[in-house]
Structures are given as structure tokens and as C-alpha cells.
Image: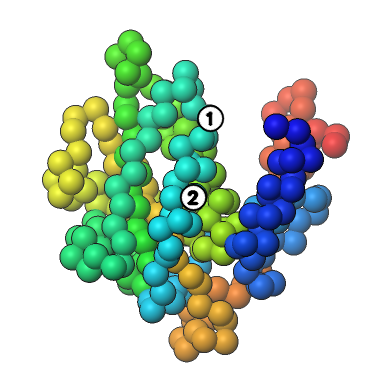
């Protein structure tokens, strides 16, 4: 497919699923980046009245499915619970730490990511399984953002509980949770502390701190 065709498909896609209005949490990048990357952020105040269209959910999961992985092992499995299924949603919510439950209860969809610890091809440990799940989660988050959804990933999960609740087999480890839904616009967040969290501009380290050349600690000239 030519670059032009790809671009026009992307343009049509964005037209169909317009992105969030400008938000104080959107990145102010020093260099040009794709819009859904600058517009992705991790909200705490979700709108509990909204659900996520299956079409959008499928699209975000499809983006995750096409992530790169070592030896194309695709060491990811997702467990899914939607708000519409109250019982399944409550069960998954219980698998998060209390601090995460407090806000994630208002999300529309919850997911758990699970990592396969060994390569299916030879049974050897997959040192980069977590890395690959991070790639899939990143693709998921970016695609979801492009569709107007908001995504918040979590390390705070109860691994033993997930293992038991869902019958996760040996050789697979629960890794993270992902909350998906619609962030409340700042003016609709009643709690002042919550509003501050969801409006404070995001910060990042500079290139000088994270891109070295020649020797550790020596900033690369870019
Ligand atoms: C793997 C991972 C684990 C995280 N765990 C939690 C968590 O347990 N609870 C939470 O509130 N936020 C969690 N976060 C969200 C981060 O705090 C957030 O991504 C970070 O502060 C940067 O903000 P941004 O996503 O809005 O750019 C996690 C993010 C990632 C990628």
C-alpha cells in the first residue's frame, strides 16, 4: 500500500473518530510527534455513565495484535471485562490494588495483560516477554486515543488473585491492568484534588538525560 493511500485511510479514520478536544494533559512536545501520541495521557477521573463501542475496542485490540515481538511469539494474552457485564467487571476490579480500584471503578472497560514466560518454539525463557507486552499495550493505547478513548495502565494488581480467579496456567504471569473509558472533562470533575491530578501538565526528562553517545552519561548531539 502506498504512503498516500495509507495517509488518506488514516485521515478518513480520524474524521470518523475525531480526537479529544485540546486538553491540558496533552503533551507539548519539543519535536513533532503523531497526534495520538501527544494526546495520550493517563486519567484518574473517568465518566462512569459511558460504555465503549465494540468497534473501537476491537480496533484497539487489533493494534495490540499487530505489535512487534521477539520471534513473533506474541507472548501476550488479554483478559477483558466490560462495564455492561457488571459481575465480570466487579470481579476484575477486585483484582486491582485498593488504590487503583478507587478510580478504575469508573472506567468502561478493564483489561489484564498476561505474559507467556517461555518461547513456544523451544521452551526457553523469553527474556523480553514483558517488553513485547509493553509494545502491545502502547499500540493499544495509541490506537484507543486516536479513537477518542482514554487509557490508564496499572502495575498495581493482585497477581495471586488474578491467577486464581481466571485460572491462569503455570508459565504465564499476570503483568498489568489497563483501564479504558472516557475521561471526564476538567469542568465536570467535582473533587478539587482529582481535578488537579487530571489537569496538571505532564513532564518528561530531556534528551540530554536519556540519549547518550560514546559513554554512559555523555549526552548525544542530536
Ligand atoms: C506499566 C505501568 C504501570 C503503571 N501503574 C500504575 C498504577 O498502578 N496506578 C496508577 O495510578 N498509575 C499507574 N501508571 C500510570 C503512570 O503513573 C503514568 O503513565 C505516568 O505517570 C505518566 O503519565 P501519562 O501516562 O499521563 O503520560 C502506570 C503506567 C504504566 C505504563
Residue depicted at 28% across the width and 36% down the height: 173
Residue 25, placed above or below residue 61: below
Label 1: which secondary element: loop
Is 185 in front, or is 154? 185
Give the x, y percent position of residue 107.
39, 68
Q: Which residue is the site of mark 1?
A: 68
Quarter of image, res 46: bottom left
Is 204 in front, or is 184? 184
Q: Is residue 151 visible?
A: yes
Q: Is residue 93 left or right of residue 8?
A: left
Give the x, y percent position of residue 215.
74, 25
Ranked by sequence position, the earlier of labels 2 and 1 is: 2
Q: Quadrant of the N terminus?
A: top right
CB within 8 Å, label 2 to label 1: no
Residue 208, placed above or below residue 200: above
Q: How crowded is the residue under tag 1: few (<14 C-alpha within 10 Å), some, or many (20+)? A: some
Q: How many marks?
A: 2
Residue depicted at 75% across the width and 33% down the height: 2
Q: How crowded is the residue under tag 2: few (<14 C-alpha within 10 Å), some, or many (20+)? A: many
Q: Is residue 71 left or right of residue 116?
A: right
Label 2: which secondary element: helix
Residue 128, placed above or below residue 99: above
Is 205 in front, or is 111? 111
Give the x, y percent position of residue 82.
31, 62
Q: Quadrant of the C terminus?
A: top right
Q: Which residue is the site of mark 2?
A: 60
Residue depicted at 56% across the width and 79% down the height: 185
Amino acid at each position: 500500500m502506498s504512503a498516500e493511500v495509507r495517509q488518506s485511510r488514516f485521515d478518513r479514520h480520524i474524521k470518523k473518530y475525531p480526537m479529544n478536544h485540546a486538553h491540558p494533559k496533552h503533551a507539548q512536545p519539543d519535536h513533532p510527534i503523531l497526534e495520538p501520541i501527544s494526546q495520550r495521557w493517563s486519567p484518574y477521573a473517568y465518566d462512569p455513565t459511558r460504555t465503549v463501542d465494540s468497534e473501537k475496542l476491537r480496533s484497539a485490540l487489533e493494534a495490540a495484535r499487530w505489535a512487534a515481538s521477539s520471534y513473533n511469539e506474541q507472548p501476550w494474552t488479554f483478559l477483558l471485562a466490560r462495564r455492561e457485564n457488571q459481575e465480570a467487571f466487579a470481579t476484575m476490579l477486585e483484582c486491582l490494588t485498593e488504590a487503583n480500584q478507587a478510580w478504575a471503578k469508573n472506567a468502561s472497560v478493564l483489561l489484564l495483560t498476561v505474559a507467556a514466560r517461555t518461547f513456544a518454539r523451544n521452551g526457553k525463557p523469553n527474556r523480553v516477554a514483558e517488553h513485547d507486552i509493553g509494545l502491545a499495550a502502547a499500540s493499544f493505547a495509541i490506537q484507543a486515543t486516536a479513537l477518542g478513548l482514554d487509557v490508564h495502565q496499572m502495575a498495581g494488581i493482585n497477581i495471586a488473585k488474578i491467577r486464581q480467579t481466571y485460572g491462569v496456567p503455570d508459565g504465564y504471569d499476570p503483568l498489568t491492568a489497563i483501564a479504558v473509558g472516557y475521561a471526564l472533562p476538567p469542568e465536570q470533575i467535582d473533587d478539587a484534588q482529582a481535578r488537579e491530578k487530571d489537569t496538571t501538565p505532564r513532564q518528561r526528562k530531556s534528551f540530554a538525560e536519556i540519549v547518550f553517545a560514546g559513554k554512559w552519561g555523555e549526552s548525544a548531539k542530536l
